[in-house]
Amino acid sequence: MKSKLSAESNYDVLELSGEIDLHYSPQLREMILGSLKNGNSLLINMAEVSYIDSSGIASLVEGFQTAKTANLSYGLLTISSPALEVLTLTRLDRVFTLYDTIEQFQSQL
Amino acid sequence: MENTSAISISNLDVDYGSRRILSNINFDIREGEIMVIMGDSGSGKSTLLRTMLGLKKPSAGHIKMLGTDICHASQKELYKLREKMGVAFQGGALFTSMSVTENIQLRLREHTKLDENTIQIMTRIKLDMVNLLPYENLMPSELSGGMKKRAALARAIIMDPKLLFFDEPSAGLDPITSAELDNLIVMLKETMRMTIVVVTHELESVFAIADRIAILGDGELIQVGTPEEIKSSTDERVINLLNRTPRENIVDGDVHLQRLTRDNQ
Ligand SMILES: Nc1ncnc2c1ncn2[C@@H]1O[C@H](COP(=O)(O)OP(=O)(O)OP(=O)(O)O)[C@@H](O)[C@H]1O
Ligand SMILES: [Mg+2]
């Protein structure tokens, strides 16, 4: 997994790529929770995610729940088809808010 | 990557005492495929699985799993390999003193240092996949046969294994539960990219899930092939195995008469 966290004026963007498995999900979890703890809304770009296992999915779920409690926006952007398949299998495509463009995310902030 | 071998079995002999159970078995299981192992009761299907899992030592031959020769691997290599494998056995023994949830989480707790929240969510994801979420706090003794099988599957996939072994997943299940389990197995292959080895007797399941089928008989590997190849096999033992239809499927009176009266060989 590779990741890059960058700050926009009123939200953070986390770009993920590669394979997210048991070895990387703790790191993913820390980045997501860290951003939210700072009071920032979070947009996670998943265009380049080639594989995500259930520990990675669990980190995304925990982040979403945390954001909800803190009243922050939390979205997944341009999700790759391998990642979308896993979300569909786990019925989480109905839980997360999926965005096709950054503008869509910005417009609901 | 479609055609690389996940498992490679060569010149394998397996004995129980002085009885040869499997003799000179050779075949490969490709990455990302569902291989179904079929054969009569007692033909050695479970023995082959146990040998692949390193639970039974072969008398001769080699088994390579994800590149590791399990007959000559160090303890450390075997340990690493086992982390990538999930197993749901015939009979599906859950630990009776632990709840469904505790059974499913056991390997995560023993093999990883994941955060407690992550473990809880992962467990619930797997429970939901096998439709057991409402029963997470039940003890195994409170589950039906089908629920036990589904719990055993959830436990087998908790670590998102690369290799999944499943002995008789649908035996004794009603057709709907059995079809749901078949669907789930196919989804695990397609979505989670697992390589899956399934032992089953149920022909309907076989043709619903198999990419390829390996048929055991008389201690040998009779044939390996795609469902189409197996269906059009000219080997009498394969034909006999496929024609052992459930009673209600026998519609042709002449065929049935012949089955009842033909000479025993
Ligand atoms: N622990 C054991 N000790 C001695 N012989 C065994 C043992 N386990 C299996 N066998 C023998 O090995 C042969 C193959 O058994 P195995 O359990 O592999 O068959 P199977 O194909 O899985 O049958 P089933 O469809 O009934 O599960 C049988 O003849 C059996 O008697
Ligand atoms: Mg068996």
Image (cartoon, coloured by chain):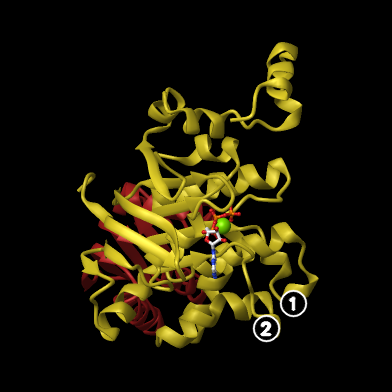
Chain colours: A red, B yellow
* Residue drawn where x is 60% and y is 78% of the image: B103
Whole-percent x, y for residue A83 in the image: 36, 54
* Residue drawn where x is 52% and y is 36% of the image: B208
Quarter the C terminus of chain B occupies: top right
| Left or right of A26 in this view: A65 | right
Can I make out residue B104 in this image?
A: yes
| Left or right of B62 in this view: B203 | right
Q: Can you say whether A72 is above or below B47 in the image? A: below
Q: Can you say whether B235 is above or below B115 in the image? A: above
Whole-percent x, y for residue B97 in the image: 70, 85
Q: How many marks?
A: 2
Residue B139: mark in rendering: 1
Whole-percent x, y for residue B85 in the image: 39, 68
Please state which of residues B116 and B38 is positioned toward the viewer in this rendering.
B38
> Ligand 2 falls in which quarter?
bottom right
* Residue drawn where x is 41% and y is 26% of the image: B228
Q: What residue type is labelled 2?
A: Met
Q: Name the residue under label 2.
A: B98
